[in-house]
């Protein structure tokens, strides 16, 4: 975990602008994948068992797609909009596998602002190097400046 | 984790039928939420800090939406279709908060089968008691009986 993930800065709805961006990079370690399997109960051997994975098209164990999706959640919860924002929806299109040890960069960008409902729509992208591994869109409800 | 999550039974594409269902129930513990925060980097205080949560509309800390989504992934990876299936896409509509200690039941149901691409579409639902907390749809690519 990067030290940059400590801050509690947050953007109120009024602070958001189209094309604002934030990102977070994290290596997807063996230990993270085992911990994610433990915490969700998803012990699919494609993620955990090298001998099993060798029989699949991926040949080596891959990370859980929902762990990669968790990095998107981390950008929202920690950076943009930051604490207080409420997840309304998320679409996830898995484009390529994430392998153990890969450095994943999750990025989000404001693509629409709906003031009447204080909702913001984001384009979401996760990459390993130049390869897009996950893309989708999210809607968050963001507190107004006057609220708690 | 329930003992039922040990099996490696899997459904090949040819074994799938419309309306087949599977589910998985898990209590979302404090320890799970802390572990999910560690493994994703999402330390949003709405999930972890009771004093902060008291200032939000939810009043008490809530679980990460993507942790609940992980239970859907667990049903796919462990039960239906089981090991070998590849996640193509998932939509997630967050309907209500999951609080620390809530028992969450994640259910998936086959709603469409596309033989040419060996893809199966699933309706996905997570409930706490009678309350829908998360719903969406997923597409998985499922190995044919003749493949590895």
Image (tube, coloured by chain):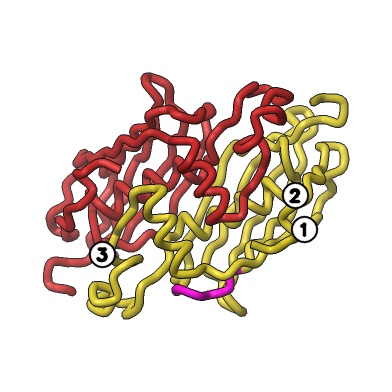
Chain colours: A yellow, B red
Residue at the (48%, 41%) spot, across then down: B31
Name the image quarter holding residue A142: top right
Tags 2 and 1 touching, CB below 8 Å: yes
Which type of secondary structure does the marked residue at label 3 adopt?
loop
Which type of secondary structure does the marked residue at label 2 adopt?
loop
On whether residue B115 falls in the magenta region, the answer is no
- Image coordinates of residue A11 in percent, x first then y, are 82, 43
Q: On the picture, is B130 further left or further right than A89?
A: left
Residue at the (73%, 61%) spot, across then down: A3
Circle number at residue A80: 2
Mark 1 Cα shell of 10 Å, populated few (<14), some (14-19), many (≥20): some
Q: Are marks 1 and 3 on the same chain?
A: no
Which type of secondary structure does the marked residue at label 1 adopt?
strand
Residue at the (29%, 55%) spot, across then down: B77
Dominant secondary structure, magenta: loop
Outermost front residue: B31
Name the image quarter holding residue B82: bottom left
Mark 2 Cα shell of 10 Å, populated few (<14), some (14-19), many (≥20): many
- Image coordinates of residue B128 in percent, x first then y, are 40, 25
Q: Is residue A142 above or below residue A96?
A: above
In the image, the segment drawn in magenta is: A100-104
Give the distance between the C-alpha atoms of the residues marked 3 and 2, in whole angstroms. 35 Å
Q: Which residue is mark 1?
A: A21
Residue at the (72%, 35%) spot, across then down: A84
Query: Foreground residue, A25 or B147?
Result: A25
- Image coordinates of residue B58 in percent, x first then y, are 63, 23
Give the distance between the C-alpha atoms of the residues marked 2 and 1, in whole angstroms. 8 Å
Q: Which residue is mark 3?
A: B84
Name the image quarter holding residue A89: top right
């Amino acid at each position: 975990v990067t030290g940059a993930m400590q801050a509690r800065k947050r953007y109120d709805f009024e602070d958001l602008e189209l094309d604002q961006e934030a990102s977070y990079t994290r290596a997807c370690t063996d230990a993270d994948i085992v911990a994610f399997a433990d915490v969700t109960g998803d012990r699919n051997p494609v993620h955990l068992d090298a001998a099993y994975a060798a029989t699949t098209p991926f040949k080596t164990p891959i990370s859980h797609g929902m762990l990669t999706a968790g990095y998107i959640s981390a950008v929202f919860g920690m950076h943009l909009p930051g604490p207080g924002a409420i997840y309304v929806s998320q679409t996830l299109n898995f484009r390529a596998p994430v392998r153990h040890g890969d450095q994943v960069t999750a990025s989000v960008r404001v693509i629409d602002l709906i003031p009447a409902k204080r909702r913001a729509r984001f384009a979401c992208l996760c990459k390993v190097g130049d390869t897009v591994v996950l893309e989708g869109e999210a809607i968050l409800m963001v507190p107004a400046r006057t609220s708690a």
